[in-house]
C-alpha cells in the first residue's frame, strides 16, 4: 500500500517538526472521529497528510457519545431507510476492521401492558420494523431479532416492573469506546504516514494571491508554525462555523448544536445484562440503559443511561449536565424501573454536542437528519459536517474524494477493509480470561502493556481504586498515545472520570506523580494538572447544582 510519507513515532515533538518542515497535500483541522477518519483515508490513499487538533483527540463530541455503533432503529421508524442501510453496512466494517474495539451488543425493548415504550397495541408494528431492520443490514451481524416471553424479559432486566411486563424484543447492534476508537484511527493514520498532533490550534488560514487557501497558521502552545498544504479540510464538528469564519470572514451560522447527556450509576441498581430501551414520561423519546465494565462472573460494574437530545446555546467548549438534564434522565429511570435512583447514586456524567446541520424547517433536534454534507468554499476549504459516529468512514471517503477532485488526482479508497492498529492477528479472549479487558482495549498491543508490567510489577496496580484501569495503562498513554495532560489520561485514554468521578479525583494526585517523570513535569506542573482536573469536577457539580463540598472537590 503506498504511503504519503514514512511513519513517525506517535510522539508530539516528532510530529511538530514534520508539520513545520513539510508541504502536505491535505491538512485536516479537527481530531474527532471524522477528522481522524479523513486523515486515515487520505494517508492510506498515498496523500501527504497532516492533522491538527486544538485540544486532544476526541476531546469534543467524539468522547461524549452514547458509544454505540448502530444503524439507528428510530431512523428506520422515521422512514430514513437509506441512512439505516448505510450505517448498518459501516457497522459491519467496523466490527471487521476493529474487532478488539467494537463488540456486538444486544438491545431489549420491553413490551409493557401500560406506560411503556411499546404497548401490546403497537408490538406487532414493532416486530415488522425489526424484520425490516434485520433485512436492511442488521443480519450482517450474524443474529436476528427475537421475541421474548415475560420471564425472559425480566431475566435480562429484573428491575423492570414485573406486573407490567408482557414480553420483549431483542435485536442486535454494537458498541465501542468512542474516545479509544478515535485515538486508534488517528494512530493508524500516523502509521500510514500522516503527521498528527494534538494541542495545535489553527488560528489563521493562509491564502495564495488568487485567494485560494494554502495552509494554516497553527499555535502549538510554544510557537506558531505555518503548516503548508494544497488543500485544507475542516472536520471541526460543532466548531465548523469557527473555521468557516477564518475562511469567509463572517459566521455562517450553519450548525445547530444538540446536547446529549448521559449519567453513570452502579450496575446493581439496574441489573441488566444487555442494553435496555426505556421510555421518557410524556415524551416521544427513549433512553438506553447500557451495562458497562463486565466482570469475569458476568456481572458489571456500572450502567450508563442516555441520551437526551435538546437544543443548546451555551459555550461549545464546556457543555455541562444541568439540573433539568438530571431530572429528565432520573425521571425516566424511576418511571420505568421498580427501583428508586437518586442523584446521590450518580457516579459520573457527561454532556456532548451533536453537530447537526441547520435545516429550513424547524422542530426538535431529535428529528433532524443525521446525514452528512461535504461542501467546498470559494477559497477551496472543504468542510464536512453532520453525520454520526457509526458512519465516520463513509463521511471520510466522501471528503477525500472531494480533496482528490481539488488536486485533480485519482486514488481509490482503501479503508473499507483496512484494519486498525491492534486488529491484525487479534483473537477474542473468553470473558473470564485475565487479559480479556486489556485485549478488548488494546488488541494485539496488549503485549506492550504486559511488557511494562514485566519491567515493573507495581504497574499492575489499579490506577483508581475500585476501577479496572492499571498504572501501566497511564504510562502507555503518555509514551505511545500522545497523552499530554492529566485530564487526557483520566477522561479519554481511560474512562475513569466518566465511571466514578469522586474515586478518580481522590486518585488524581497519585496519577499525576506517576506520569510526571514521563512528561518532564515539575512539582508546580503536577499541582497545575491536579488543579485543572479538580476544576473540571467542580464545574460539573456546579452545573448540576450539587454541593461541591459533598464530593470533597476542594479537599
Image (cartoon, helix red, strand yellow):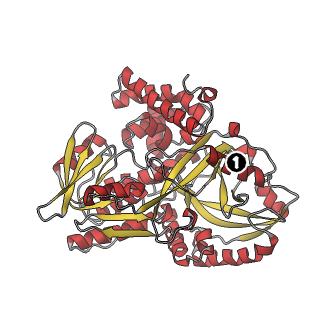
Identity of the residue furthest to the left in this view: 209
Image position of 231 with respect to 534: above or below: below
Image position of 234 with respect to 478: above or below: below
Residue for point 53% across, 32% down: 538
* Local crowd size for mark 1, using a 10 Å CA cut-off: few (<14), some (14–19), many (≥20): many
Q: Is residue 435 visible?
A: no
Q: On the rendered structure, is 429 left or right of 154?
A: left
Residue for point 13% across, 61% down: 208
Q: How far across and down, in percent of the image, does residue 132 sit?
A: 64, 78
State the image quarter where residue 43 is shown: bottom left
Q: Nearer the viewer, residue 450 or 530?
A: 530
Instruction: Tell me the quarter of the image containing the N terminus.
Output: bottom left
Residue for point 49% across, 35% down: 536
Q: How far across and down, in percent of the image, does residue 252 sit?
A: 35, 62
Q: On the rendered structure, is 488 left or right of 189?
A: right
Q: On the rendered structure, is 339 left or right of 302?
A: right
Q: How far across and down, in percent of the image, does residue 504 sit?
A: 55, 33
Q: Nearer the viewer, residue 79 or 8?
A: 79
Q: Is residue 447 visible?
A: yes
Image position of 68 with respect to 134: above or below: above
Element on which disc 1 rests: helix
State the image quarter where residue 200 is shown: top left
Q: How far across and down, in percent of the image, does residue 162 sit?
A: 86, 57
Instruction: Tell me the quarter of the image containing the C terminus.
Output: top right
Q: Count how many numbered circles sit on residues in the image.
A: 1
Residue tagged 1: 330
Q: Nearer the viewer, residue 86 or 29?
A: 29
Amino acid at each position: 500500500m503506498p504511503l504519503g510519507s514514512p511513519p513517525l513515532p506517535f510522539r508530539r515533538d516528532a510530529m511538530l517538526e514534520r508539520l513545520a518542515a513539510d508541504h502536505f497535500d491535505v491538512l485536516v483541522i479537527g481530531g474527532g472521529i471524522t477528522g481522524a477518519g479523513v486523515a486515515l483515508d487520505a494517508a492510506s490513499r498515498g496523500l501527504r497528510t497532516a492533522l491538527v487538533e486544538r485540544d486532544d483527540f476526541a476531546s469534543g463530541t467524539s468522547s461524549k457519545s452514547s458509544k454505540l455503533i448502530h444503524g439507528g432503529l428510530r431512523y428506520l421508524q422515521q422512514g430514513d431507510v437509506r441512512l439505516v442501510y448505510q450505517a448498518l453496512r459501516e457497522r459491519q466494517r467496523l466490527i471487521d476492521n476493529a474487532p478488539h474495539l467494537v463488540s456486538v451488543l444486544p438491545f431489549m425493548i420491553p413490551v409493557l401492558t401500560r406506560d411503556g415504550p411499546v404497548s401490546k397495541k403497537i408490538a406487532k408494528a414493532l416486530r415488522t420494523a425489526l424484520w425490516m431492520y434485520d433485512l436492511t443490514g442488521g443480519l450482517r451481524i450474524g443474529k436476528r431479532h427475537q421475541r421474548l416471553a415475560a420471564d425472559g424479559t425480566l431475566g435480562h432486566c429484573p428491575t423492570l416492573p414485573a406486573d407490567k411486563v408482557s414480553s420483549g424484543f431483542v435485536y442486535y447492534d454494537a458498541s465501542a469506546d468512542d474516545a479509544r476508537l478515535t485515538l486508534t484511527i488517528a494512530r493508524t493514520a500516523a502509521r500510514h504516514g500522516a503527521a498528527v498532533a494534538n494541542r495545535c490550534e489553527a488560528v489563521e488560514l493562509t491564502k495564495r494571491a488568487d485567494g485560494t487557501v494554502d495552509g494554516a497558521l497553527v499555535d502549538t502552545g510554544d510557537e506558531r508554525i505555518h503548516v503548508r498544504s494544497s488543500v485544507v479540510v475542516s472536520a471541526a464538528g460543532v466548531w465548523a462555523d469557527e473555521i468557516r469564519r477564518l475562511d469567509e470572514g463572517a459566521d455562517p451560522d450553519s450548525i445547530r448544536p444538540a446536547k446529549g447527556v448521559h449519567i453513570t450509576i452502579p450496575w446493581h441498581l439496574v441489573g441488566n445484562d444487555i442494553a435496555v430501551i426505556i421510555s421518557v414520561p410524556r415524551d416521544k423519546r427513549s433512553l438506553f440503559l447500557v451495562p458497562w465494565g463486565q466482570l469475569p462472573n458476568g456481572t458489571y460494574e456500572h450502567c450508563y443511561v442516555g441520551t437526551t437530545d435538546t437544543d443548546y446555546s451555551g459555550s461549545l467548549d464546556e457543555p455541562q449536565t444541568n439540573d433539568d438534564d438530571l431530572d429528565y434522565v432520573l425521571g425516566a429511570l424511576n418511571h420505568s424501573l421498580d427501583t428508586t435512583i437518586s442523584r446521590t447514586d450518580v457516579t459520573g456524567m457527561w454532556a456532548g454536542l451533536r453537530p447537526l446541520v441547520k435545516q429550513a424547517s424547524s422542530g426538535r433536534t431529535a428529528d433532524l437528519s443525521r446525514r452528512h454534507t461535504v461542501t467546498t468554499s470559494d477559497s477551496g476549504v472543504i468542510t464536512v459536517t453532520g453525520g454520526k459516529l457509526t458512519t465516520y468512514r463513509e463521511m471520510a471517503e466522501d471528503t477525500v474524494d472531494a480533496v482528490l477532485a481539488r488536486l485533480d488526482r485519482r486514488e481509490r479508497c482503501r479503508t473499507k477493509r483496512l484494519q486498525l492498529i491492534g486488529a491484525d492477528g487479534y483473537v477474542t479472549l473468553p470473558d473470564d480470561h485475565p487479559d480479556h479487558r486489556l485485549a478488548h482495549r488494546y488488541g494485539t498491543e496488549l503485549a506492550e502493556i504486559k511488557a511494562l508490567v514485566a519491567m515493573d510489577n507495581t504497574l499492575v496496580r489499579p490506577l483508581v481504586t475500585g476501577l479496572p484501569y492499571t498504572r501501566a495503562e497511564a504510562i502507555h498513554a503518555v509514551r505511545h498515545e500522545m497523552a499530554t495532560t492529566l485530564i487526557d489520561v483520566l477522561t479519554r485514554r481511560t474512562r475513569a472520570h466518566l465511571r466514578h468521578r469522586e474515586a478518580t479525583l481522590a486518585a488524581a494526585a497519585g496519577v499525576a506523580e506517576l506520569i510526571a517523570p514521563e512528561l518532564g513535569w515539575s512539582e508546580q506542573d503536577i499541582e497545575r494538572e491536579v488543579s485543572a482536573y479538580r476544576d473540571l469536577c467542580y464545574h460539573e457539580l456546579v452545573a448540576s447544582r450539587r454541593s461541591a463540598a459533598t464530593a470533597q472537590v476542594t479537599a
